[in-house]
Image (cartoon, rainbow, N blue to C red):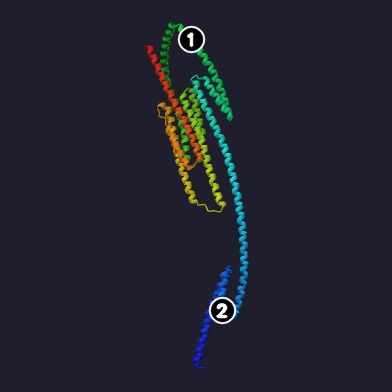
Amino acid sequence: MSDDDREKRLREYEERKRREEEISNQALELMGKATELAKVKDYEESLKLYNEAVVLLKKINWTNQIQTIQKTINQLEIDKGHHIQSLEKQKAREERQRKQDAEQAAALEEQAIKHKEKEEQRLKQYKEKKEREEQISNQAYDLMEKASELVKAYEFDEALERYNESLELFKEINWPHEIQTTQKTISRVSREKEQYFRGLEEKKAREEQERRLKAEHEAKLEEKARKIRERKERERAEKIEAIESEKEFKQRITDMGEEADKMVREYEVEIKKGNFEVEPPYEQALGIYRNMRQMLQDRGWGEQVRIASNQITHLKQKLKQDKALREVEQEKIRKHQEYLDSLKFKKKEVDMSEYERKKKEEEDFQNQINNIMNEADRMAREYDIEFRKRGVEVPCPYQDIIKKYRTLKDMLKEKGWETQVDIINKQIKFYKEKLEKDEKLREIEAQKIQKQKQYDDYIKVKKD
């Protein structure tokens, strides 16, 4: 063998060894990766790399290493089968758990719905009962007020009919105090009726006597006119003496009214801010106005007594409205809590930013509603104060107040707040009734002025 042949064979040997080392390194690298993949249970990819390593080792005829790798491949196939079985068992357990969770969730949700329906039905029945009592009592009070006006007009039979109708209504809703009061009123009016007709009989007899003694009657009239003039002079002097006492009494009445109105106004400002922790002042304000009404009755100030009574009715309505508003607020809090609880139960994330936005929209809308209601109540309150001072010369604002509440009703309907729509309907009815009473009062005042003018004209003619 020549030197060239030996050198060529050496180069071939070295090239074969170099290629063998390169392939073996590639195979070892694949085996290392396959081992790591097997540790993390990625059997498919691990087996793929081991098989690629076997292909490489076959190229360099590494039989022993191929047998070792084949054993590893066989073991991996076994491990792969065990792993697949384990995954299938785990998946089955998870599916069973998912079904159990879903069934439990459905049962709890159905229970919550039934409880909610039961509570809503109970609340509905309670509200219907209260609304029925309120409707019937309002009818009864209206009948009593009409009866009272009929008594003033000496229409006793019709008045007694109205009082008996109101008595039956109070019996229907079982209000013992009102039943007893109405029965006493019926007895009193019956006595007044007897006295009135007895008085008419006596008056008729006197008029007959006066016709027979016309000359003497004229003389008596002149004497009576003289005594009237003297009495008016005395009354004028007495009025001058009493005017200072009357001013002090008027100021006291005004102060009491302003104190009660201030309490209500400050409370409504707090409610407008959303502060429902402050105690309602309506019971205290009602106490002040009831004391005021008694003081006015003792003085015989009938018109001011009517105004105080109207304010008492207004405060009672405000008290009902406040209770309803607080019920609505509690219902909103309860529904919000149920909403959050349901989200937690179903393991869903709560989009708090969306919730806060909706809550802010509801608060802004509630503030807008409160502003309109406060403005309407302010107009009514200021009118009552001015009416006590100036009487029927003060313009009546009830038409404008009713318009505001109708606007408010449309806003609430559009928002779907049906509970507050019912409250607004009651307010509209309340102010319609106040408007009717105000118009009737103004009509009576006009008649009084006309009668006084006729009397003054008569006295003037007699003097002439």
Q: Residues within 10 Å of mark 2 (few under 14, many from 20)?
A: many
Q: Residue at left 54%, top 45%?
A: 335
Q: Residues within 10 Å of mark 1 (few under 14, many from 20)?
A: few
Task: Determine whether the residue tagged by mark 1 lies in a helix, strand or loop.
Answer: helix
Residue designated by label 2: 57
Between 349 and 247, the one lying in front of the other is 349
Q: Position of residue 185 (x, y in %)?
A: 55, 22
Residue designated by label 1: 206
Between 278 and 327, the one lying in front of the other is 327
Q: Position of residue 391 (x, y in %)?
A: 42, 26
Tell me if residue 378 can be seen: no
Of the residues under marks 1 and 2, which one precedes in the sequence?
Answer: 2
Is 367 on the left-hand or right-hand side of 75?
left
Where on the picture, by quarter, is residue 214? Answer: top left
Q: Amino acid at mark 2?
A: Leu
Q: Position of residue 450 (x, y in %)?
A: 40, 20
Task: Determine whether the residue tagged by mark 2 lies in a helix, strand or loop.
Answer: helix
